[in-house]
Structures are given as structure tokens and as C-alpha cells.
Amino acid sequence: MTKIELTVDGAAVSDDVEPRMLLVQYLREKLGKTGTVIGCDTSNCGACTVHLDGTSVKSCNVLAVQANGRTVTTIEGLADTAEGDLHPVQEAFRECHGLQCGFCTPGMIMQAVDLLAENPTPTEEEVRLGMEGNLCRCTGYHNIVKSVLQASGQTEGAQA
């Protein structure tokens, strides 16, 4: 066992973990952060995307011990729960219907937040390129792209 200490969604945590435990397993099984979804276990789908020190990573491709001393933000830590407000990207996904079954949505949102932090006013093509490591089998991506563009402030509310 290896002792790790990190901050997850603003809370300091300390645990003993197996050195081979994946970050996605640690978040879900030890901390109950089930919004971080296990999709493919091969880092191809992006459903498990979280922020590690502010940068999006696929948590099925990171060992929990690699997060030692670092800060992790999950989909549960993105919203301002004290005020009851969704993060602007979460709100845009809700308004623009950027989800269907919802399985990929947490990873999509986490990737979109990172994309907008790097490029606050992306073009549609830049959104599509920035989101290409996250797969959705339901939506065809149109409303996901529309959600990201709305969150960037470049488009107005959802269309009926």
C-alpha cells in the first residue's frame, strides 16, 4: 500500500492505495465520486475525464499515486453547490440539450471547461478538434458543440 494525500473537489483527502489503482477507481470506489464514469478502460472514450491541477486528463490513464500532492476536480466539484448554481458549461449543456443518455456528459463537460480555459472563444472547428478525444454514441455532437459555443458566450440560448 502507498499513502497518498491530495485535494479532491476542494477537500483534502489522505488514503492508503494499491500502487496499481487507477485514479478513476480511487475516485469512484474510495471517495464515491461516481460522476466520473468508467467507459472503456483504455483512454479512448473520455467518459472518465477529470481535471488534474486544472488540466483535463482521462482518469483511467492515471494512477492514483500519480495524483499524490495534486488537486483533482471532478464533475461533482465543478458546480457552485453552496449557491446551487451549475457551472456555466453545465448550464449550457442543459440549455442546449448537449446530452442524450448522459453517460459521456461528465467527461464532455470537463473537457469543454479545459478547452474554454485554453481558448475562451473557439470556432466551431476548434471546438470539434478540442473535444475529439471524448466520444458520444447518442448525440451526433451537434448539440455538444452548440453547448460549448454557448458557454463561451458566442451564441445565445438554446433553440427549440
Image (tube, rainbow, N blue to C red):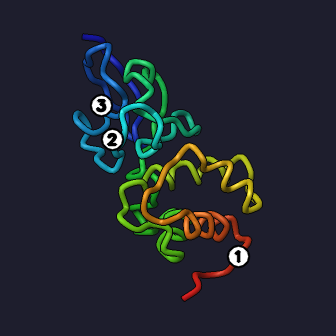
> Is the residue marked by circle 3 packed among few (<14), some (14-19), or many (20+) residues within 10 Å?
some
The residue positioned 24% from the left and 10% from the top of the image is 1
| Residue sitting nearer the eye, 56 or 101 | 101
Q: Nearer the viewer, mark 2 or mark 3?
A: 2
Report the amino acid beneath label 2: Ile
Residue under label 2, please give it: 38
Q: CA distance from mark 2 to mark 3?
A: 12 Å
- Residue with the mark numbered 1: 155
Instruction: Report how far apart the C-alphas of labels 1 and 2 lie in the structure.
Output: 32 Å
Q: Residues within 10 Å of mark 2 (few under 14, many from 20)?
A: many
Which is in the foreground here, disc 1 or disc 3?
1
Q: CA distance from mark 1 to mark 3?
A: 38 Å
Percent x, y of residue 147: 58, 68
Whole-percent x, y for residue 144 in the image: 55, 64
Residue 55 falls in image quadrant: top right
Q: Where does label 3 land, which residue?
A: 26
Q: Vertical placement of 26 versus 107: above or below?
A: above
Q: Which part of the image, by quadrant, shows the C terminus?
A: bottom right
Give the camera-side residue of 63 and 32: 63
Classify residue 134 as left or right of residue 64: right
The image quarter containing residue 64 is top left
**Horizontal placement of 40 versus 139: left or right?**
left
* SS of the residue under disc 3: helix
Residue at point 26%, 19% (across, down) = 17
Q: Secondary structure at mark 2?
A: loop
The three-letter code of the residue at mark 1 reads Thr
Badge 1: few (under 14), some or many (20 or more) residues near its Cα, within 10 Å? few
